[in-house]
Amino acid sequence: MRLAIMQPYFLPYIGYLQLLNGVDKFVLYDDVNYINKGWINRNRILINGREYLFTIPLKDASQNKLINEIYLSSDLKWRGKLLKTLEQAYKKAPFYATALAVTEKIVNLDAEKLSDWIADSFRVLVDYLDIQTQIISSSSIYQNTHLKAQERILDICRQEKTEHYINPIGGRELYDKTVFEQNGIQLHFIKSQPIVYPQFKNEFVPWLSIVDIMMFNDVTTITGFLNDYELV
């Protein structure tokens, strides 16, 4: 079984979804500390040919809290504002109607906790993109918050009896293939290939939210993107 573990990101870029699609089971790592100004509740879209960073407002967010202890803002006006921004940015995109419907369903999901909301959003995304990966939350099963860093990842791998752990390429400095091999686990890192597609008539802006890709590409094309990587 192939396993991946990642913090929950809202409407992430294609590399995140390549990792999710490339494994049998995907663990949303939601019982680790929230990171301010990370990608958990922020992402980038295209407005007037340039990247635009949007942020989902939270209630009393702090790096001293776990991700699954963070709540969405109780002021619901942000949902309508975000959808209006997407409408204005992408209304002339070729797959606007379908992509906006999926995004609107996600934005209006009924959840109070950030981690629950993102987990539910992934269930909508994988259904739309026909991804078969099983998604679970780390807080629901492993009971190993006393462990840290690589040892905690290894413990999850052992509990899942996985033979193959796949991590984003940025983890090459954090995880030791030899240590994983000593535990009977193959360790590979996913390296995305350059992905380019027409964004109106603008110069291409890479690695935006999956929303951008959905606006400009059909599911068949996106499926090709999901498999456009190598393991190193």
Image (tube, rainbow, N blue to C red):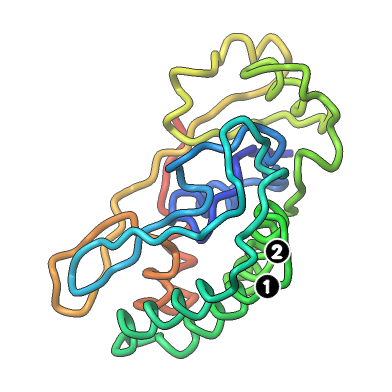
The quarter of the picture where residue 160 lies is top right
Q: Nearer the viewer, residue 230 or 212?
A: 212
* Left or right: 51 as drawn, with respect to 97: left
Of helix, strand and loop, which one carries label 2?
Answer: helix
Is 76 situated above or below 6? below
Q: Considering only order in the chain, which callout, 1 or 2, is on the residue closer to the N terminus? A: 1
Of helix, strand and loop, which one carries label 1?
Answer: loop
* Left or right: 60 as drawn, with respect to 156: left
In x, y percent, where is residue 20?
59, 50
Tag in front: 2 or 1: 1
Residue at 50%, 80% (x, y): give it: 80
The residue that mark 2 highlights is: 120
The quarter of the picture where residue 198 lies is bottom left
The amino acid beneath tag 2 is Asp
Q: Nearer the viewer, residue 157 or 29?
A: 29
The residue that mark 1 highlights is: 109
